[in-house]
Image (spheres, rainbow, N blue to C red):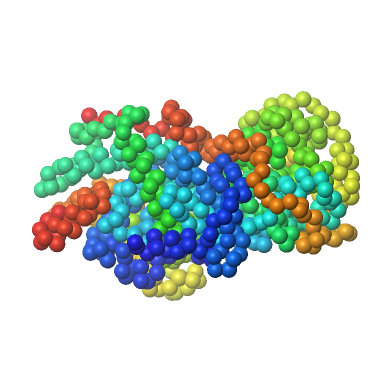
Amino acid sequence: MDLAVRENSQRAARWEKGVKVGEGTFANVYKGIERSTGRKVAIKKIKAGEMKDGLDMTALREVKFLQELHHPNIIALLDVFSVKQNINLVLEFLDTDLEAVIRDKALIFQNADIKSWIAMSLRGLEYIHRNGVLHRDLKPNNLLIASNGELKIADFGLAREFGDAGSKMTCQVITRWYRPPELLFGSRFYSTAVDMWSIGTIFVELILRVPFLSGETDIDQLKKTFHAMGTPTEQDWPGHTKLPDYHEIGSYPKNPWWNMISSIGKEGQDLVKDMLKYDPVARVSARKALEHRFFSSYPRPTPPASLPKPLAELRPRALAPDETQGKPALKSSGSGAMKRKAESPQPGRNVARKLVFA
Amino acid sequence: MAHAPHPLATLEQIIKTPSSEDGIPSEVEADLRAAGCMLIQEAGVMLSLPQSTMATAQVIFHRFYYVSSLYSFGVNDISISSLFLSTKLCETPVRLRDLINTYLFLLARIQYLLNQPSNQPFRPALPSSNFRFDVPSFHDEIFWEWKDVITANEMQILKRLGFNMQVDLPYNHMINYLKILDLVFEDEVAQMCWSILNDMLLTPMYAIHPPHTLACASILLSTRLLRIPLPEGWYILFDATYDDTWSCCGHVMKLYNDWGLESPRGSVTLGFTMNNGDKGQNVQENKWRRAWVLAQSRKAVRRWIDERDKGQNSV
């Protein structure tokens, strides 16, 4: 047994795996404890059977980004080890997630509570963006809540770096209900604004207690979006009709839709409007959002420890439809490159079928 | 888990590499590292991958052989697997089938060269020669064999590197430094630095020195070759030391010399730009032959060690 193998098994021995607490397409999550301290952890085991072409890209992304990002509002990766062909990520244990909190009708949210959750999300997101990373899968389900009430952003399986401004990225990211219209229109060049849209929809969801824009298909999602906030004009969003997958989606009138969230107050409505701007360029950044009057005005955000929490223990629960069907198919620049069955060579990347030098 | 953003080999790992512990001479190890990296580079060019993907793969490849021995892991296997891993890390996915076909083509070309009589100079696989390559059919066994090799070795690489895959490349540092030194619009400088950094990937420097040192080394070497004077101690500005930068340059020059490569204009190609020298050429060609044979598998390395130990080291 050489050094590298020994080190791996030493690391594996530090953690004890307990009962299963969740199941996803690519991973199972188990409760665990650190043997030396008794500290609770979560062990995310990436399923080996699902591996088509070697290790799954989502697992690689998750490890890569969590190793780099350290922030109180981002889930901490404590260790990585492998058993046979499986990868196990040891993550800090978090009691529940924002989705469970929203769904628990026994809980009543004060405006100060909502302010606190949004502030923590934005702090984490600002840090992520500052480090040149896009999360690309923000939803209440991925905003986990620690036992002390701290909110932590999790699941970096779709994250990627955006340092290179000219690089084409896939638009098949972010769970549909939280996906911004530019992605639904097939934009391949996007930036931090996509995550801000997600935060905006989560913000509204916290106020309404139901998902704000719950489209059943991508087209339906656009319809619902425009139905709620009016069809964008060239003035609202310059150039959107030129996007690759642009379709005419009826023309819905612009109503003062923000009246339905009037309970959050003038500043809150204002911030939501900034986050849900159709034009990604005009959409507020995480940094600017944190400087918004909403956070400095009364009432002050609730301290994390006093935030409402569901009493029920975290247990395996049904996943959103998007998740059970698998994550959105990933097709970065090479489009379809991850699919083994696509036999025909792709345009622009011709590898000769036959090379004859005779 | 406090990780350095860009892990480097420790002094102990550099002095006593796992391969040297298994009785592989450092010269052979260096040759095999270069051979493996050339494969990565060539395959990457054929698949039109960006340089950052190929560079990441080569850095991972070098790091791997600071924690594992050539006696246990074959060069070709690790090189294709690290390239596959890096296409995922760099978000530039390729189809596994394309990658395998590319490698099969490159390996077939190497075999073609190896089959030529060793007392004659290489005749490259030009269209006029009788080199021929058929892409395996869709259901060919060979595809599944390679796929298994790649998936298994991909996991080995991750496991042995402790899942540490952060690679910080020196290219952007180099451009920034050139701007500060006001050399960015100087003819040839940036291009030559770029080429030197690419060629340096064949040496283990990327696993030994931090990116800013490598960037300084490329600038130092190219300005020397182009006879452009720089102020004394300029590298101090970029936190590099005299010894480290010169050591990198030395490794690159040794690479050019050992492998008979031309001065750094454009990138390295598999040995077809050899000096038309006298007997030096023969020595270099034997070096190529040995590296290519040993790169094939760990079995080849083991056989070579056995034969050498029996005193008939003639490969």
Residue B312's x, y, as percent? 10, 58
Which of the image's four quarters has the N terminus of chain B? bottom right
Instruction: Tell me if A203 is positioned left or right of A46 in this view.
Output: right
Residue for point 37% across, 64% down: A3
Residue for point 55% across, 38% down: A330
Quadrant of the rendered image containing residue A40: bottom right
Q: How many marks?
A: 0
Camera sees residue B88:
yes
Instruction: Tell me if B148 is positioned left or right of A99 in this view.
Output: left
Quadrant of the rendered image containing residue A183: top right
- As drawn, the residue found furthest toward the front would be A19
Residue A23's x, y, as percent? 59, 44
Does A31 appear above or below B50? below
Residue for point 32% across, 39% down: B145
Which of the image's four quarters has the C terminus of chain B? bottom left
Residue A117's x, y, as percent? 76, 54
Residue B65's x, y, as percent? 34, 59
Camera sees residue B263:
no
* Residue nearest the viewer, comparing A65 with B186: A65
* Residue nearest the viewer, comparing A26 with B300: A26
Residue for point 68% across, 46% down: A141
